[in-house]
Every structure is written in C-alpha cells, then in structure tokens.
Image: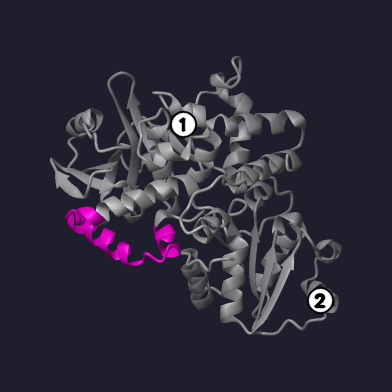
Amino acid sequence: MVIVMKRDFYKVLEDWQKNDIETPLMVIGARQVGKTYIIDEFCKNNFNDYIYINLKDNKEVCKIFKEDEDLDIIVKNLQMYLNRKIKENTIIFIDEIQESEEAIAALKYFCENEFPYKIIVAGSLLGVKLKRFSKSFPVGKVLIHHMYPLSFKEFLMALKKDEYIELIEKSFQNNKPLPEYFHKELLDIYRHFLITGGMPQMVNSYINNKGEITENIILKSIIEAYLADMQEQTKNASETNKIAKMYLNIPSQLAKENKKYQISKIDKYARFRDYESAMEWLLASNLIIPCYYVNRFETPLKAFMDDTNFKIYMSDVGLLTENLGIPYNNILLDNDFMFKGAIAENYVATELQKNNVNLYYYQKPQVMEVDFLIDINDGIIPIEVKASDRVKSTSLNKFMQTEKLKLGYRISTKNFGLENNIKSIPLYAVFCIK
C-alpha cells in the first residue's frame, strides 16, 4: 500500500503557483527522493487540466523538441501528438527532462511567451546534464529548486506523529528539556530513522510493516541503480570507475579519526585533480553532501573555504547504514560500534542540507576539530556531534574560548538545555537549525 506522505517541498510548489507560475519550475534531485510523486500530487490537487509527459518513456516528444525551435510549432505538434489542447489553465509536468537538451532550452521560450504556460520539469540526473549542457541554458527564465529525501521532521509526519514537531520546536527555542518519556521515545524513532533513512519507498515499506525493520532489498536496489547511472551517464569506463570508487569509499573515509576525504586511500598514487571530475559528477547528481575546510573563522565562511580539502557525506543516512552493513540491533539497542559516530554525523549533515545550510569544518590536527561550522542568522556557529550522551566537549570548548564565541551547538542524545554558552540539541531536533 502506498502511503500518502506530507512533504515540506509541497510548500515550494504552492509558493510557485502563487507568485511565479508563468516562470517554468525546475526540480533537481537524486533518483527515488519522491520528485515525481509530490509534483504529480500537487498537479492533480490544484489543476483541473493536467498533462504528464515522461521523456524517458516518450522519445516521440523528444523528437518534437529536437525538430524545431519555433515554440508555436512545438506546441502545435505537442497538441497533435497528445490529442490534447493546451489551455490557460493547463499544467504541464515534464518528467526526466534530462533526456532532451532541446526541451530544457525551450523553457526560455515558454517563459517569454505571452500565453500563460504553466510548466514544471524534473529529472533524476538533471544536475549532471546541466553541468555538461551544450546548448544555451535559459538563465533567468527558470526557477530552480532542489529536492532531498525525507527529513526526520517529515518522517514524524509520515508516522502520524506531527504533535511531536511543535514540542521539539518549542524546546529548541526555549532550551527547556522535553519530558523524559517523550525524549526517550523520540530517540527510539531517531534510531529507526538511521536505518530507514528518508527515501520514500523505504519509509513506505517501514510504515506498511508497522514499524518492523526487516531485511529488504529497497536500499540495496537504490544503490545499485545509482551505480548503473554512473555507468550510463559517463563518457568512459575510467570515469565511471573513479566515480564509483569515490562514492563507495565514503563509509570507510568517515570511519577515520580524521574524516577528511583522502584520495590516496582509494588510489595510492592519485591526487585530487585526478578525481576532480568524479567529485563534480557526484555533486551534480545530488548523491553526496560536501563539507569544506575553512582556514579562517570569519563571515562569509564560503570566502575562506578550501575546495580541495573536504569531508563527504552520503545524501541519505539509510543508504550509508545499508552500505556499511551494520546489524540493525546494534543501532536499535544503542550499542557501541565502530561506525556509530560516523552515522550520527552523516545524519546531521543530511538534516542541515535539507534546510539549505552550507557545511564547513575547522581542524588543527592533534589540537582540536569542529565537526561543522555554519553561517546562519545567529552568526557563525560551531557544531559538535556526539552519538551518545557522553558529551565531554574538549574541542568545542577550546574553539569557543579561542574565538571568543558566545554560542555553540552540541548535538547528542542528551535533552535540550543551555550551559556555558553551549546549546544542547538532541539528535532528533536537528531539523530546527535553519
């Protein structure tokens, strides 16, 4: 049974309808994050006349865009082929648009035309296609939004536990601990989320199994599909091999004490420049989350980042857990195991990314390391992530004293609180950091 899931991205679609509907909307996201489902639901719920076109399944429509650049002719041929009239109240959703560069280029003409066209496009490898786009991209004529797997907040909504969200947000604001019963229950749900992750198909299976986590092939098949995409969408076997190596090596890189991604760990004699295009492919495909080293603690952090010195996280914590092959009970029973800290840190990275927070880190070997630095409305905030309630924060304290900071975040299994300018945030409340 397919579960109807509430997604925060639905508001992006509503805002587009309200404010910018005559500018084509482009939704970029990795495979299986729920783009087609949520856009389809939106179109069905808000428009009486809805046309859905999947370019991967419909090569004839690709030909229509390829054969002519005149928009009037394109529209006329589309109407004839679909046997449908495109009217003022028609919404058109073009899925897998990465299959046609001509269709992407034509978005400019849809935007500029006097007729009020309403068009949404999406694609699972759209970011990769745009990186290698050979035609003129319609700059300024398209609104681009990224979509990610479910956040922990959306996971709570899918489980029909919406009432917890307001409680969490209030405690985050006032630094008051939640009642211990609620705190323990939310930590239990969080541990289940570390296994399921936010891929909608996996969450749907979890709910259908009434919260039981059983061996399944969903996450395995998603990883296999990603690897197949690498082969299909790259120029040669050497490039494919580098991308796959880089992606599959993320778990072991995160297990190191120094989590900086080291190319030498996957290719002894290689340098970053040898894998730079592989890194760009993974970034464009939305399969990884980068966290860049900064050498100065000043705003904007982006101005002081070193783009050759970085940590890499997987785009979904469930995919990381599956890749690691961790026995589920080790996570559910909160046992100590080698990758416990890496999984928690990867989870935090995914939650921050979903709130459009850029990630940076700072490190002085054998002196101190700050897991994340973020640049938000409250200023630059250092973040330390702990997978348990053992929260001795030597590095964070030293960093705050050195930089004379007034606020730091410690994310752990401890309840909410504020002590010595360190704000305690439970792992299940990372979605509150915006």
| Pick the front one: 17 or 299 | 17
Q: Is residue 241 above or below residue 319?
A: above
Q: Quadrant of residue 47?
A: bottom right
Q: In this image, 240 relative to 207: left or right?
A: right
Structural crowding at the residue carrying mark 1, measured as other residues with C-alpha within 10 Å and reported as few (<14), some (14–19) or many (≥20): some
Q: Which residue position is annotated with label 2?
A: 82
Checking the image for residue 310, the label placed there is: 1
Checking the image for residue 373, the label placed there is: none
Examine the rendering and report whether any part of residue 400 can be seen: yes
Tag 2: amino acid: Leu
Q: In this image, 100 relative to 338: left or right?
A: right
Q: In this image, 41 relative to 346: left or right?
A: right
Q: Is residue 371 magenta?
A: no
Tag 1: amino acid: Phe
Q: Position of residue 72 (x, y in %)?
A: 79, 76
Q: Quadrant of the N terminus?
A: bottom right
Tell me which residue sits at (74%, 49%) in the image: 134
